[in-house]
């Protein structure tokens, strides 16, 4: 039985290689990781949007890569999980979320980015997981939403459901609806608080 290893690293590139395989280049690791074609097809099905981001050079991708060493000293991919992130490694689902994440970091705002595996205090009634939550506003918790998909009925229905839940709960909400404007709205004003 060969030893296996988990590598967490930025994904820098994927290119076809010989012997019906792909060569994966990871950040901070000079040695490529090889991936057999059937596994790459499965990764394309699971993470196609993320990989397309990398191919279009419009974002950053980080992954956890389960690899094993081969008898010839190569690294062979067994499985992987991929996630699109901002340049500061904040998880994002789109280039527009990346714009918001970068703006929040640049403005030195106090915020979190809930991810889909989370539930609990960051999900409103267990039904809404905001794109970001801003903590330095008058209400101490401002839910931030980026609505970027156009023309998909199921997306529009979910968007209206989320807006209804926010209104029902009387929470502060910041929205960027890309069907109305491509320019990001101003961030909510920051409220400076002193430690009690």
Image (cartoon, rainbow, N blue to C red):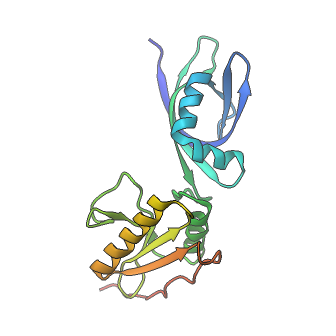
Q: Residue 115, how many percent across, how many down?
A: 42, 56
Residue shown at 60% from the left, 68% from the top: 102
Residue shown at 68% from the left, 18% from the top: 20
Q: Is residue 82 above or below residue 148?
A: above
Q: Is residue 196 above or below residue 109?
A: below
The reply to whether residue 27 is visible in this rendering is no
Q: Residue 105, how many percent across, how many down?
A: 56, 71
Q: Nearer the viewer, residue 92 or 44?
A: 44
Q: As drawn, is 174 to the left or to the right of 56?
A: left
Q: As drawn, is 30 to the left or to the right of 90?
A: right
Q: Which image quadrant for residue 10?
A: top right
The reply to whether residue 192 is visible in this rendering is yes
Location of the C terminus by quadrant is bottom left
Q: Is residue 40 above or below residue 56?
A: above
Q: Nearer the viewer, residue 14 or 7?
A: 14
Residue shown at 40% from the left, 54% from the top: 116
Q: Residue 60, how many percent across, how many down?
A: 63, 52
Residue shown at 30% from the left, 83% from the top: 170
Q: Residue 97, how many percent across, how many down?
A: 56, 65
Q: Is residue 12 above or below residue 76?
A: below
Q: Which image quadrant for residue 24?
A: top right
Q: Nearer the viewer, residue 186 or 194?
A: 186
Location of the N terminus by quadrant is top left
Q: As drawn, is 169 to the left or to the right of 82?
A: left
């Amino acid at each position: 039985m060969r030893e296996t290893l988990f590598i967490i690293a930025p994904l820098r590139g994927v290119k076809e290689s010989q012997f019906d395989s792909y060569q994966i280049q990871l950040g901070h690791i000079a040695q490529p990781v090889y991936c057999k074609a059937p596994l790459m097809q499965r990764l394309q099905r699971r993470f196609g949007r993320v990989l397309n981001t990398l191919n279009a050079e419009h974002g950053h991708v980080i992954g956890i890569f389960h690899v094993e060493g081969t008898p010839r000293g190569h690294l062979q991919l067994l499985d992987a999980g991929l996630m699109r992130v901002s340049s500061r490694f904040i998880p994002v689902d789109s280039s527009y979320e990346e714009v918001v994440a970068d703006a929040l970091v640049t403005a030195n705002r106090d915020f979190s980015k809930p991810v889909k595996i989370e539930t609990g205090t960051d999900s409103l009634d267990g039904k809404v997981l905001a794109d970001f939550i801003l903590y330095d506003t008058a209400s101490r918790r401002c839910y931030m939403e980026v609505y970027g998909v156009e023309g998909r009925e199921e997306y529009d229905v979910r968007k209206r459901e989320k807006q209804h839940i926010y209104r029902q709960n009387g929470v502060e909400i910041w929205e960027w609806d890309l069907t109305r404007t491509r320019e990001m709205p101003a961030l909510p004003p920051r409220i400076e608080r002193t430690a009690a």
